[in-house]
Image (cartoon, rainbow, N blue to C red):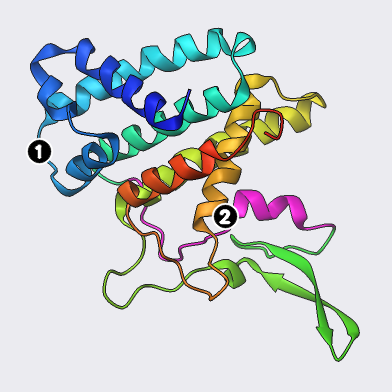
Amino acid sequence: MKTADEYEQLLWLIRTHNGSTREAFIRPFAKTVHQFTTRKKNVSARNSAKAAITGYLRELKSSAEKTNVMDITRKLMAVHMIDAATLAQPTNTAKLHHWLPLCYLRDFTLGVEQPQVRGVFVPTLNYDRGVQLQAVSSDKSFVHPANKNSGFYQDAAESFFCNVESWYSEVMNLLKLGHREPNNYELAMLVCMLVVQTLRSPHPDGSFRLRTLSEFSKAAEAVMDSIGNGYA
């Protein structure tokens, strides 16, 4: 199943969950996301989405071992996006917007002494005229600048990142404690994180071209459809 089909399946589920709010979810996925992130009314539709998502995730988790990882990833990505789009208030108030989050960077500290306050230091290698130089970089090396016209990422996009990062961090902590391989559901969460990082990272020219959640939904569709299940 393609990502667009998974997107539509979630919208169909939300429409059937509460017929009185179905009109809010009849547009294509990216347009639905855009609608909710730019207009803050329609509380009943937002509540319908939340209720449908809860049951959807419960069923997805119970059937995960019988489902291939990329199909789970597509479903989880759709859930993350609708969840972030239908938040009444954004959860992210960060002043520094990392494109490589702290929860990811912490796995690359490799014994480097860490700051006493919030932040991460990671070892890096620099090359000057063919000479390898060891150095230390702070997490602020992975903070993206604001766009002069539109500022940082859209609040809903930041909430989406926060969702994915939280799930990723939770799974990594569980795996470290249990010293085991991830199950299909957990593996799909990790793939979600890597897909998001593919989209958030700067282009070779240093620019950050995606800013809104609807833009990320379309770009994620293309990325996920390019990944085979075996590769994931």
The residue lying at 69 percent from left, 20 percent from top is 183
Q: Which residues are magenta?
A: 91-110
- Type of residue at label 2? Pro
- Type of residue at label 1? Lys
Is 99 part of what is drawn in magenta? yes
Tag 1's secondary structure? loop
User: Where does residue 146 sit, x and y in percent of width and height?
Assistant: 38, 72
- Image: 46 above or below 48: below
Tag 2's secondary structure? loop
Residue bearing the label numbered 1 = 41
User: Where does residue 64 sit, x and y in percent of width and height?
Assistant: 58, 13
Please identify the quarter of the rendering in which residue 159 is found: top left
Quarter of the rendering occupied by the C terminus = top right
- Image: 2 above or below 224: above
Residue bearing the label numbered 2 = 101
- Image: 110 above or below 2: below
